[in-house]
Image: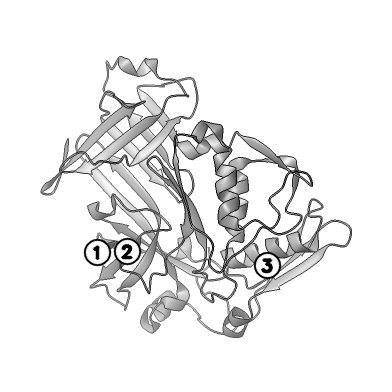
Amino acid sequence: MVSLTSMDVTIAVTVNGSAFETPSQVNFTDEGEIPTCSLVFPAGSSAKYGISKKDIVRIFIGLDGVPEYPRFTGHLKEEDGFISDRMELVASLNRGVDDNRFVDDYDNLDGMEIGQAIFTIFSEISELSWMTCHVEQTNPIVRVPTDFRFPNGISKYDLIRQLRDLATDPNDPLDLGRYTTFQHGDRFYFRKMPNPSSVTPSVILTYSEDLLDIDPEATIRFAYNKSVVKGDDGVLATFQNDHRIATDGLAEAAIISNEDIKSNGDAYEIARANVMSKMVRKAGADAMSHLLLYQMPDVSVIQIVGAPHGLSDNYMLKSLMVDITEATVSISGSLDIPVDLLSTNLSRLLQVSGSGSNALALQN
């Protein structure tokens, strides 16, 4: 048990529901895809060698007590077990990475609503039958395009990701109408990302020198508002967002060329997903607070108050890192800040041009 100001951080580990030895160190990283976790055990631990890759490991991290739900659920990355008393884990969704599926003219998802298609594929991952699946219907409804094919096979997890990336709202000017998939404990979710400006924040953080740090050179990136995709035998499609072109000027991505793309509809959906995933320039900020412990990337909205340069606002949590040793606790997350939402003062501070076709002054 580690002291964090006036709170105690409690760690508990179970394997297949049975209590396991308590680690002396926990390193947890969640970047919105498949979280990973590393456990270090005190010298002389013995029970750990009985674990295999098939076993389900749950890690409970709580403030002033053990929580009801695990912060991490997963399994060993490799069957080899441990090196130097360290256990390397990957979240249970990784089971879908090694589980493949063909999508062809005889077995496909054509015309199916995206949420239902994701539910269908997830239900086919036999090693995840113990997980509860929560899937939203897309709104407005987005359907799997005709000729959405992977005749040479694709992992079921990558197929879910491809479907998720198709679930966008082309009328949303700020790239906020996107969907996310994630694992939280024993549950899998597909849901729309919240709009930070219109939802109640999950956590309110007061700015201080160690709470928020802007690092524009590392995290500001360019945006695309037009994409062209070239496929096999004359297949060609273009997607562009007229609102962003009018606001920022034309910013076209490099042409995507792939002979595996067999239809104009498939090419169009790929072009649309490419634009929607990279349509708004982003600045990043780092927050550090124990209040972030239970938050989820791409789902939790964090409110910053009392910040300089007009930075006080609501922001999306994009990643979370938890590092716990016998003496210290560090809980931090990165926030995603669309440049459009930055105040005039902060835009000047970062030398960001918010209109026309001018590029950002600060580049990677």
Q: Position of residue 292 (x, y in %)?
A: 29, 54
Q: Residue at x 61, y 34 (%)?
A: 99
Residue that numbered label 3 is attached to: 253
Residue that numbered label 2 is attached to: 302
Q: Residue at x 23, y 41 (%)?
A: 67
In the image shown, does 156 or 281 lie closer to the viewer?
156
Going by the picture, which residue comes out furthest to the left? 6
Where, by quadrant of the figure, is residue 289 drawn?
bottom left
Q: Earlier in the sequence, mark 2 or mark 1?
A: 1
Given the image, on which type of amino acid does mark 2 rest?
Answer: Ile
Where, by quadrant of the figure, is residue 157 drawn?
top right
Given the image, on which type of amino acid does mark 3 rest?
Answer: Ala
Q: Residue at x 48, y 77 (%)?
A: 352
Callouts 2 and 1 close, C-beta under 8 Å: yes
Q: Position of residue 364 (x, y in %)?
A: 53, 63
Q: Is residue 247 above or below residue 200?
A: below
Q: Position of residue 243 (x, y in %)?
A: 59, 82
Residue 205: numbered disc: 1
In the image shown, does 209 or 267 lie closer to the viewer?
267
Given the image, on which type of amino acid does mark 1 rest?
Answer: Leu
